[in-house]
Amino acid sequence: MEIIRSQRRSSKVDDVVSTLPLYRSAPPLQVRLEDFELFAIDRLRVLKGISDGLSRGKKPDEMEKLVSDLWKANMRHPQASEFVNKDIISHFVLRLVYCRTEELRKWFLSMETALFRHRFRLETPEAQRVLLAEFDHPYKAVSHAEFESVKEKLGQVARSFGQSLPSADAIYFKVPFEEVPELVAGRRVFLQKGHAYVAMNQVVSLVVTQFRSHLSKALVLTNRKWTSTIREQEKERLTPIVEALSTSYLGPDYSQPREFVEISIKDIDQVANSSFPLCMRHLFEKLREDHHLKHGGRMQLGLFLKGVGLKLDDALAFWKAEFSQKVGSERFDKEYAYSIRHNYGKEGKRTDYTPYSCQKIISSTPGVGDHHGCPYRHFSEENLRAALGKMGVGNRAMEDVMDKVRNRHYQLACTLTFEAVHGSSCDAGINHPNQYFSDSQKILHPKVDPAR
Amino acid sequence: MTMEEVDSGRDAMEIDGCEPEGQEKMRENAVPDGFNANYLKVYYGKLFPHSDLFKWMSYGNDGKHPACDQSYIGRREFSFTLADDIYLRFQSFNSVHEMENSIKEKCPFKIDIGPVYSVDPTKRHAYAQSGDNVFTPVERELVFDIDITDYDDVRYCCSGADVCLDCWPLMTVAIKVIDTALRDDFGFNHILWVYSGRRGVHCWVCDGRARRLSNEQRAAIADYFRVYKGNENSQKKVSLVGPALHPFLARSYTEVLKDFFEEKLLPGQKLFSTEERYEKILKIIPDESITSELRGKWQENRRSSISKEDINAIRWEQLKHMLQSGKQKAQGLRRCVEEIVFSYTYPRLDMEVSKHMNHLLKAPFCVHPKTGRVCVPIDPKSCEEFDPTSVPTLSKLLEELNMGGFRADADDEWERTSLGKSVKFFRLSFLQPLLKSCKEEIESAYNAKLQLSKNSLSW
């Protein structure tokens, strides 16, 4: 049982104290039932704050401050000695909460990893080195002779993202490139024959990769335990708490359309005009115009339409009507119909895919020829203004929207657009294109839902 | 195939592979251009290198060594596209004969190769019953797909699926840049480049290390290669920030892209010859005063006597001079020259294909149904000599077969056709070195395991 690290380390290195646990195994601690829930809710606030920060496209240094603030605000405990316990208990409770579906696991994994990353960066270099040793990775620092031989290239890499040249005593680790995917993806390391040269201030990536893969495996195991024993055993006690916790924060997943909304092809142009958020309107219009969308656009719009209530048969007819004008109906049946059925869980893995959330759309990276992504983030100012004008956003509101965009509050920009177009407020904010749609429909057709 | 033929086929099985129409064609050497199922049958019967493909896909596991994984090849997905767009997904084969017979019998218009799954893909439904998702891809070559249609905004000679010798060099440049990085940066050795039959190239990275990459690691490699940050709705296509270029980009620029841009693309596509074309380049420069000065110059000397050939080079020099002269201290503007070159020449990959293990990719040596061209390997060492308009076509190959007369039991009929060169290249330059290293890998893994069990025994 090695979770309380400050204790373990105190025997060998007294002056280096880190309060960052690796969560290797569940704590044998006694927890009061109300703490079980309260701690978890506090940690959820942190994770949710991180999720919002990421979806606003905050930069690493801004994220660091955000995480540090969130952590201080939510994870303190009246007794200093209980601080680490609260950290560990809340983590393991949320593991139970978020182990139960692929979607939940994915969310929890990325938020916990982001949290760990930023907490690691806030540690002192000495503490980082100690943590690094805890992960028992086999890589040695690059020797002086080897460092000299690649010094020039390392300097080139450092300068390519605005850092100063490495000094002669800089520590670099030489690791297989597979271990640091995010540094490879950002071209932030020098690569040679399959090895990545990782600077000391980049080891966070190395550590995070391992943290993530460990947690990912652990979540799958927890899920198995949950379904096989815990859920039944704790039917009276923990299960209700756990089940309530996950829904309270993630919101609905929109993969199943609400029962009272259902659209048919003949109405689609009209609802697109009245109730689609800009990202979907844009895709929709481009599809009508070009009779084609590239993969990213097909996924983003296709899953949205599914969430809106377009039935599989209608979806096939809809896409075919457009694509066949460009590629012919034969090629449509051959190359595109499969992936539409796939989205509806009728092919391949047979997963019922979930419509993309704002966060996913904002963090996508549309390339040449692509029209998907979040217009507030991915359009040039000129194009965004034109698009908003077409939606009927007036001058004053437009400036407000652009102001949010400049501050990278893309979801807030979308919320303001919603309010400008509908002339009514949207207090919850926009988190999901399908939420935009259903909120819009509620305003436009208040009587549709007989239950209210 | 008409109904009658199906019936006669059922009555007399020996006709298979030698349709009446096909026989008639054999009497005269000339074979009409184009693509049809009968030609394809002959191609699969006499020319398609079944055993080479099978050996490749086995990665040494078809050997006798005790460490060979006998189930390996049988877990690989093959997918056939038949006439009338019938898809047969999740085919798998346990022996070369099984594969060869299936291909000859079904005569697929296209053969795709998928990943190696955890279990035999034909039995995936049986495993699906057990609840846990055991049917999942476990290995797959790292693949790249580059398509000339993605370059439509920088080529004026063709558009869409068309390709000519003026725009094909864009593909050559892509091969050079990606191939060098895969070898020097990522340390891969077993790389196969294949002409896709019409408008692009495919790349298969087959090292064991590449085959075992996770989706996340694949995405990281794809992103390493990505310089396009813009999309259709924002202006900038390439953004190079920071005071220096990453060594990979710097090398690509100085060793390949710069010269290609100035010597081939600039004159070949006449990038500055009309107002519409040079405006597109000026758009990349963020400084209003510079663009308007250049624009002024170029609109003025429209009437002057510079010959059409020189105008592109002259205007490019003027632009470079303006951006790189001592006056322009701003780093961003100097970078603009590089950004223009990257925008026009840097490889444009279809990212999705590379990022996921379960993407299908067309097998080499297929025949493209639209062009009749065979998807032959391209040697990256001499890729500038590759000419997509002169690769062997189905009809040409059949003609060559006919000329040689009928030979009863020749195994390697491809040797006397123009396909011979390609099959030989595939074997000598790709397959043999690959299988050699697979064998070594299997042996060393086995020895390590032996060592381990010995150690545990001594305890």
Image (tube, helix red, strand yellow):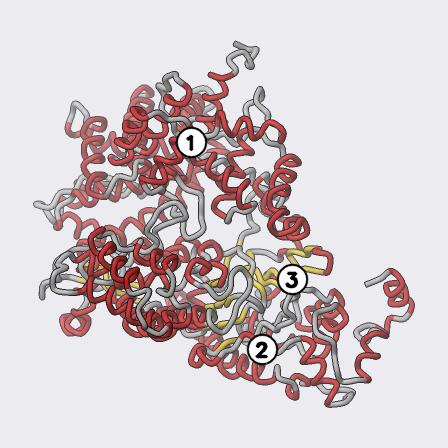
The answer to whether residue B90 is above or below residue A118 is below
SS class, disc 1: helix
The residue type indicated by label 1 comes to: Lys
Q: Which residue is drawn at 27% across and 54% down?
A: A206
Residue at the disc numbered 3: B92
Asked if badge 2 and badge 3 are on a common chain, one would say: yes
Q: State how far apart marks 3 and 1 are (Cα).
A: 53 Å
Q: State how far apart marks 2 and 3 are (Cα).
A: 30 Å
Residue A228 in the image, given as x and y percentages of width and height:
51, 35
Which of the 4 image quarters holds residue A247? top left
Query: Few, some or many C-alpha atoms within 10 Å of disc 2 (few <14, some 14-19, many ≥20)?
Result: some
Chain designation of label 2: B
Q: In this view, does A342 lie to the left or right of A242?
A: right
User: How many labels sit on residues?
Assistant: 3
The residue type indicated by label 2 comes to: Val
SS class, disc 2: loop
Q: State how far apart marks 1 and 2 are (Cα).
A: 50 Å
Query: Few, some or many C-alpha atoms within 10 Å of disc 3 (few <14, some 14-19, many ≥20)?
Result: many
Query: Which dot marks residue A296?
Result: none
Q: Toward the viewer: B237 or A294? A: B237
Query: Few, some or many C-alpha atoms within 10 Å of disc 1 (few <14, some 14-19, many ≥20)?
Result: few
Q: Toward the viewer: A105 or A260? A: A260
